[in-house]
Amino acid sequence: MLISEHWHARTIKEVEEHLHTSLTKGLTRKEAADRLEEKGANSMPAPERDGLFMKLLNQFKSPITFVLVLAVIATSSLAHYTDALVISAALLLNIVMGLVQEGRASKAFEALKKGEAQYAVVFRGGEPLKISANELVVGDVVVLSAGNAIPADMRLIEVHGLTINESALSGEWLAVEKNTEKAGEESPLVERSGMAYAGTLVASGAGRGVVVAIGGDTEIGRIAVELGKKDESVTPLMKDIRQVAKLILIAVAFIMVGIFALGTARGLPFDETLFTAIALAVASVPEGLPAAVTVVLALGMERILKSGGLVRNLLAAETLGTTSIILTDKTGTLTEGRMTLESYVSLNEVHDNADKGEARTLLTAAVLASNAYVEERPEAEGDEKLVVHGRPIEQAIVLAGLKTGISQQACLSAYPRLDELHFDSARRFGGMLVQNEKNPVAYITGAPEFLLGSMSLVVGANGDAETLTDSMRTHFLRSLETAARDGKRVIGVARVEKDLKAFPPEKELLGYLGAGALVGFLIFSDVIREEAKSAIKDMQDAGARVLMLTGDNPETALAIAKIVGIAEEGERAYTGAELSVLTDAELLEVLTTHTVFSRVAPAEKLRIANVLRDAGEVVAMTGDGVNDAPALRAAAIGVAVGSGTDVAKEASDLVLLDNGFSVITSAIREGRRLRENFKKIFAYMLSTNFSEVILIGFALVVGLPLPILPTQVLWSNLIEGGFMNFAFAFEPLYPSAMKRSPKDPEIARVLSPKLIKLIVLVGSVTATILIGIYLFLLSLELPLDEIQTLMFVAVSVNCIFMAFSMKSLGTPLWRLPLFSNRFLLVSLIGSVAFLFGALYIPFLQVLVHVTEPSMLQLAILFGFGLINLATIEIAKWIFFIREPKESRILTA
């Protein structure tokens, strides 16, 4: 095992020798310059990305684009330049929409760079020097102080009450106390007290560290490498679109072979055969699908934004609707991520405020013991005028004091500080020595069980010390046990009155503390978000399981999980260490039967997301730290809270702008709405295309002229059908859709077997009516261009009216409110207007190859459109609506 793999497990001396540096003087300027030239700057590795050319090239892999390209080439070769121009316009539209959808616009690398520290103070040749963080090299000795962002991974060599907030990496938001001791080689990150990691923040105290890793070799750098890999994942909607495109390409191939075989057998001219093939190919392709998908997704994103969520990836909006498992962090998602002083345990009772008596004495003592400080910001407004800095528990104490009228500034004015004892995890207590009216008094905060076991005196109701009896200890212990069971955090408060102007040496501290008196205990909680419980219930009702993955301890995690409804009574919490020894199969079994996982390291989160994904689950993961970024990227849907790190936000698909957990529920609801509306779009477009293929195919088989030209098919599909397509984006969500499991085939797949049946049914009914109209027109012996014009009108009218039948796939049209989607009526007007424009505006007549029909002819064809609509509704009733509600494609 190389030393560079376990810096946390090496002594300071070993690190100094291995890195060829001086812990007192640092590197010389020449040594630093040589190392910078050899190893490069302290910056993150760049991610893999496709350039614009590759993205453009990828668009031609689409079968829809491929068919249209062939159509353009074929029509151009036949000198049908107008047709080629119209098809080219459709091709360009598909390419542009494809580019909009292309991949994930990953900016995680920029966020990582933005999150890096900008400057650092180092020792070069024994002299302090302020340099850019990018110029740090391995072996540099860096000075750390409160508020500093850690610029590189370091082995600590000197600490003075140093605490570091490592929530960005570990997920645990309480600041970690640091020392210079080595840890075990297999120690998890949260237990490496002798290390400071890039991307974390000094909460309090000061110290020095020697740089052991920079750039991509740091903990955060490894995450950058993972984020930089190209995302090859495929969303459910992409799978469905690819399936449709593949089927269309196969169908077009068979059609082309069949047409040329039939043309050869009949001795038809090549150009006539090719033009017929083009017409059938164009009729087979849902040209408006890419545009419809992009517009509908964009509108869905806009609706999610209004509910407080920013969707960064178009396709993610739809994928939300199929979410089957949500992996949620505790801090910042289920809770607000801030410590609140909840109650006060004194000798005689438990208080919920510190307005008077023993509780006020207890809070005053805690304020005097606190090392947190208040910063005034005159330019700010409201609560932001006063900002408290320090350890989260001490921040909560000072804030509680401010709210109760116990100002830290006033306390320190009355009782000046004489000395400070930094909290130490080995010693288990710390405090402040202040001067009161007569003698110095030390106010101590520390581990509750330790203080309770170390003291023989307690502060009574009158403020004087008295003997701490067994019954008093029992009273305190019961409160501590209740707090632990409920997932609360507790600290003890004590005072020591001795005529000393400074704290005694370390070896005498226990004896010094033993002469003091216990004042009481403070109970803290991380505030649970008000909406968390109801939001989780809504997700569970929608068939999504919610699992908690946190860096916190098992007791606290389980208590919070029970409160919000994730875990049930009797359930246990698994730790990351327990999960790490399981095989993937064993891990999947545990994930299936349990819901709470604590002390979970970043690598374990990523593994869990991958195991669930490989098991066929559609995974959404919430998080806010750098540690969450790889799993956010691996999950089908990454959800970052707005107060989280930029890294988490940029690796995610959905950002909760106001941190409200209910936004996830709203987003899932919108995802379901998008999926249901995509079903309508697929059913509408494919049934329209299917009817056109049957119509043209029939004419070809029986040897009749083309009933409709390629440009007319394009106009009908893109213009008339396009208006109606986009209106589906505004269809409301029916309540039953949020009560069905995401694994229900009708939810999990946009193109479900029942929907395919409906497409074939509707397409066949429409084609039968169109063929009847065509044969009738031929019997009138009208000119071919007039027949093709009237068939163009018939196909367009059917496109317009058929949209109303697709408004609900499981409910009769006459039972639906007419104005539930006013945009459908607006689209009706727009479609009819463009149809009349094509028929009566001269340059459009030339473009679409139509003649001017009479108003009587139009009225008759619109009548046939209504007959077709009624026929489709009857067919829907016979084949689908009579089924039980729970098994229908969609119910109102």
Image (cartoon, rainbow, N blue to C red):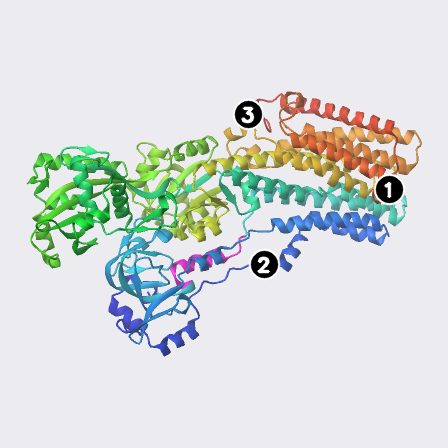
From the viewer's perspective, tell me whether residue 616 is left or right of residue 691. left
Cα distance, mark 2 to mark 1?
45 Å
Find the magenta span and give its range. 216-231
Tell me the SS state at disc 3.
helix
Q: x, y percentage for residue 605?
A: 40, 48
**Do residues under tags 3 and 2 come within 8 Å of each other at their CB atoms?**
no
Give the amino acid type for the residue marked by disc 3 in the picture.
Glu
Q: Is residue 221 magenta?
A: yes
Give the amino acid type for the residue marked by disc 2 in the picture.
Asp
From the viewer's perspective, tell me whether residue 419 is left or right of residue 192. left
* Within-10-Å neighbours for mark 1: few <14, some 14–19, many 20+: few
Residue 1: give its label.
none
The residue positioned 40% from the left and 35% from the top of the image is: 532
Foreground of the two, 382 or 459: 382
Number of numbered callouts drawn? 3
The residue tagged 3 is 886
| Predominant SS of the magenta segment | helix
Residue 42 sits in which quadrant?
bottom left
From the viewer's perspective, tell me whether residue 398 is left or right of residue 714. left
Cα distance, mark 3 to mark 2?
45 Å
Q: Is residue 16 magenta?
A: no
The residue tagged 1 is 842
Q: Is residue 360 above or below residue 185?
A: above
From the viewer's perspective, tell me whether residue 230 is left or right of residue 511. right
Residue 29 sits in which quadrant?
bottom left
Foreground of the two, 157 or 319: 157
Q: Nearer the viewer, mark 2 or mark 1?
A: 1
Tell me the SS state at disc 2.
loop
Q: Earlier in the sequence, mark 3 or mark 1?
A: 1
